[in-house]
Image: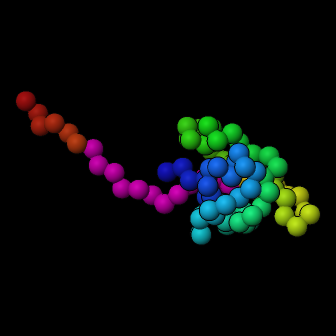
């Protein structure tokens, strides 16, 4: 399951909000309030076409890059099968 690790709107507003505790983004070093200087378009995240996310962030006057796999917790799913005729 694709999970950016923070609110998708942060890519447009250029500010990380809604950071998910324990997410891959947080483990990579993303922090609430970081300024997003460069990153993927939100539409690419929604479509799920990203194997990795690369963000250029700014915090406290320091600019740095983080790269992580946007994966959330596994989700159990079911598929219904029709009985054989």
Residue 59, x across and y down, in percent? 84, 64
Residue 34, x across and y down, in percent? 77, 61
Task: Name the outermost residue toward the left.
Answer: 85
Q: Is residue 24 visible?
A: no
Residue 81, x across and y down, in percent? 20, 39
Which residue is located at x 67 percent, y 66 percent? 27
Between residue 36 and residue 55, name the one nearer to us.
36
Magenta part of the protein: which range? 68-79
Whether residue 42 sits left or right of residue 79 in the image: it is: right
Task: Name the outermost residue toward the right.
Answer: 61
Task: Name the outermost residue toward the top.
Answer: 85
Between residue 85 and residue 41, name the one nearer to us.
41
Image quadrant in which the C terminus is located? top left
Whether residue 20 sits left or right of residue 83 in the image: it is: right
Q: Examine the structure image and report whether residue 49 is included in the region drawn in magenta.
A: no
Q: Quadrant of residue 83?
A: top left
Q: Is residue 16 visible?
A: yes
Residue 9, x across and y down, in percent? 64, 49
Whether residue 75 sits left or right of residue 24 in the image: it is: left
Which residue is located at x 75 percent, y 45 percent? 39
Which residue is located at x 80 percent, y 46 percent? 38
Q: Examine the structure image and report whether residue 75 is included in the region drawn in magenta.
A: yes
Task: Name the magenta segment's main secondary structure.
Answer: loop
Q: Quadrant of residue 84?
A: top left
Between residue 77 and residue 13, name the one nearer to us.
13
Q: Quadrant of residue 66?
A: bottom right
Number of marks drawn: 0
Q: Is residue 71 above or below residue 79?
A: below
């Amino acid at each position: 399951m694709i999970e950016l690790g923070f609110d998708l709107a942060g890519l447009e507003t250029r500010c990380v909000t809604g950071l998910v505790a324990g997410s891959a983004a947080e483990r990579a070093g993303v922090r609430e309030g970081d300024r997003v200087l460069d990153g993927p378009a939100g539409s690419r995240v929604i479509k799920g076409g990203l194997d990795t996310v690369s963000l250029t962030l700014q915090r406290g006057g320091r600019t740095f890059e983080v790269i992580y796999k946007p994966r959330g917790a596994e989700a159990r799913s079911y598929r219904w099968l029709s009985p054989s005729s």
